Structure formats: C-alpha cells, structure tokens
Image: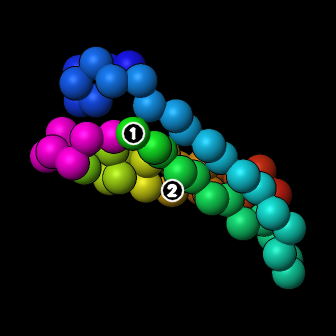
Amino acid sequence: MSEPTQGLESVVTVTFAPVDGGTEVTLRHANVPDTGEGRGHKEGWAGCLDELAKRVEGATA
C-alpha cells in the first residue's frame, strides 16, 4: 500500500523465464488505480528493470 495506490493493497508478481541467451523478466502490478499517480508506477517499474538490466549486464561482462 502506498499513497499512489490510494491506500489500496496491490500485488506485484515477477516471473523469470529462460530465453535464448538470457532471461525474460515479466512484472505485473495489479490493483493500481487508473490515476496519474497510479499510472506513474509503469514508469517507475520500467526504470527499476532498466537499472537491473544494466547491473546484470555489467556483472556478466
């Protein structure tokens, strides 16, 4: 729960699946209100996943 979810409980599910040469990461965030703040989660999660990808690539290089 957070202010952007207007106090609603939300659920984040992350799955990892092997793909040729790597791993596919799927993130689903359920029960987020359709408001500007709620939609902002999409950008926030994209930034988190981009940073994760950079760190993983740096660790394997």
Quadrant position of residue 26? bottom right
Q: Nearer the viewer, mark 2 or mark 1?
A: 1
Q: Residue at x 86, y 67 (%)?
A: 18
Q: Which portion, as a residue range, is magenta?
A: 32-38
Quadrant position of residue 33? top left
- Residue 47 in sight: no
The amino acid sitting under disc 2 is Asp
- Looking at the image, residue 3 lies above or below residue 28: above
Q: Residue at x 51, y 56 (%)?
A: 50
Circle 1 — which element? loop
The amino acid sitting under disc 1 is Asn
Report the Cα–Cα distance between label 2 and label 1: 23 Å
Q: Which mark is residue 57?
A: none
- Looking at the image, residue 59 lies above or below residue 24: above
- Residue assigned mark 2: 50
Q: Quadrant of the C terminus?
A: bottom right
Image location of residue 13, percent across then percent down:
62, 43
- Residue assigned mark 1: 31
